[in-house]
Image (spheres, rainbow, N blue to C red):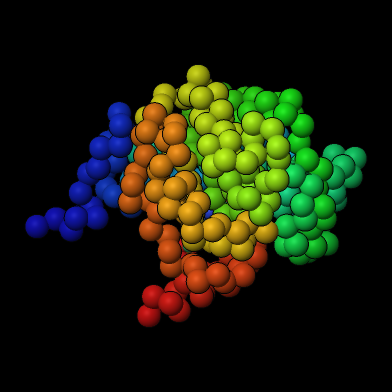
Amino acid sequence: MTQPLLRPYTLGTLTLPNRIVMAPMTRNRATNPDLAPTELHAEYYSQRASAGLIITEGTYVSPRAIGFIHVPGLYTETQVTGWKLVTDAVHAAGGRIFCQLWHTGALSHPDLQQDGALPVAPSAINPHDKAFTHAGHTPTVTPRALTAEEVTDTVAEFRHAARNAMRAGFDGIELHAANGYLFSQFFARSMNQRTDQYGGSIENRARFLFEVLDAVAHEVPPDRIGVRLNPALHELGGVIFDDPDRATFYGGGAPGYTDYPRDDQHHTLDTVQNNQRVGLDYATARARSRATRR
Ligand SMILES: Cc1cc2nc3c(=O)[nH]c(=O)nc-3n(C[C@H](O)[C@H](O)[C@H](O)COP(=O)(O)O)c2cc1C
C-alpha cells in the first residue's frame, strides 16, 4: 500500500501529488540592493519541486515591512521579474509554489527602514527582541504606532504584493500571521493597546487580518490563500497570548473566520511552547522543539 504521505491531496482547485509541504524558511540570500530573487533562488526552489507544495520564505510586501537583511520583497517590478525566474523553474520541474507575504512590524530596526525611520507597529511598544541588521542581531526599539489610515495603507500593500504574486506566476499566497510579526502584534494585547477599531476586543485585534484577507481575495482565488497562525510561540517578539485568546482566536471563534477556508488541524505547532523565550533565534527554537519531541 502506498505510504499515506505520498498519496495525492486535493487543495481547493489544486491537486498536490503528495502531502509533503515545504515550510516557509528565510534564507537571506537576496544580497542584491533590489532585494530581488536571483538564479540562486530559482535553483534552490526548483531542487525542491517534488514536494506537494512549496511555501516560499517570508517575502516583504513593502519597504516598511523589512525586518531582516537580504530577504526578498514583492513590491517592485525587479522583484516580480526575479520571482518569475523562481516560479518558472519550479513549474518546469513539475512543482507548485505559494508565496508567503510578510510584514515584520515592530520586529525591525531603524537601520533597516528608509531614512532611518522608526519601524511601524499597532502600538508604540518595544518588543524587546532582536532585529537582524547589517550589524548582526540588534536590540529592537520602540516603534511608531500606525495611524488608522496607515493601517488601510498597509492592507493595500498586501493587496499590491498579492497582485504581484499572481503576475510573477505563483500558484497562491500565504499570509504570515504567525511568530510575533505584524499580524501577531495586532492579535496580542501585550503589543496592541489601540483604542480604535483595531484594538480592544479580539474581533477588533483580528480586524487587520480580515481586512487583508478581503483585500487579497480580490487578487488571488480564495482557495489559493493560506494563513499561517501559531498559538505556540508565546513571548516571541513581545507577543504574549493569554489562554482566553488562545482558545477564542486560534480555536476559530472570532467572527469572520468561518468565511475563509481554514484547516482546524493547523494549530498543532505546540512543539515550541512552554513559554520559551525563543526570540528570533529559530535555530535554537528548532533545537528545543526537537529536544521536547524525544
Ligand atoms: C532558518 C529558518 C527560517 C524560517 N523562516 C520562516 C519564514 O520565513 N516564515 C515562517 O512562517 N516560518 C519560518 N520559519 C519557521 C519554520 O517554517 C518552522 O515552522 C520551524 O522551523 C519549526 O519546524 P521544524 O521543527 O521542522 O524546524 C523558519 C525557520 C527556520 C529554522
Q: Is residue 25 above or below residue 223?
A: below
Q: Residue at x 89, y 45 (%)?
A: 116
What is the quadrant of the C terminus in the image? Answer: bottom left
Q: Residue at x 45, y 39 (%)?
A: 254
Q: Is residue 151 visible?
A: yes
Q: Residue at x 55, y 70 (%)?
A: 275
**Outermost residue toward the top?**
218
Where on the picture, by quarter, is residue 136?
Answer: bottom right
Q: Is residue 230 left or right of residue 129?
A: left
**Outermost residue toward the right?**
115
**Outermost residue toward the left?**
1
Measured as percent of width and height from the top left, residue 193 is found at: 70, 45
Q: Residue at x 9, y 57 (%)?
A: 1
Measured as percent of width and height from the top left, residue 286 is found at: 51, 69
Q: Is residue 65 above or below residue 246?
A: above
Measured as percent of width and height from the top left, residue 289 is found at: 47, 71
Where on the picture, by quarter, is residue 154?
Answer: top right
Q: Is residue 119 left or right of residue 162?
A: right
Measured as percent of width and height from the top left, residue 278 is found at: 61, 68
Q: Is residue 206 visible?
A: no
Q: Nearer the viewer, residue 39 or 150?
A: 150
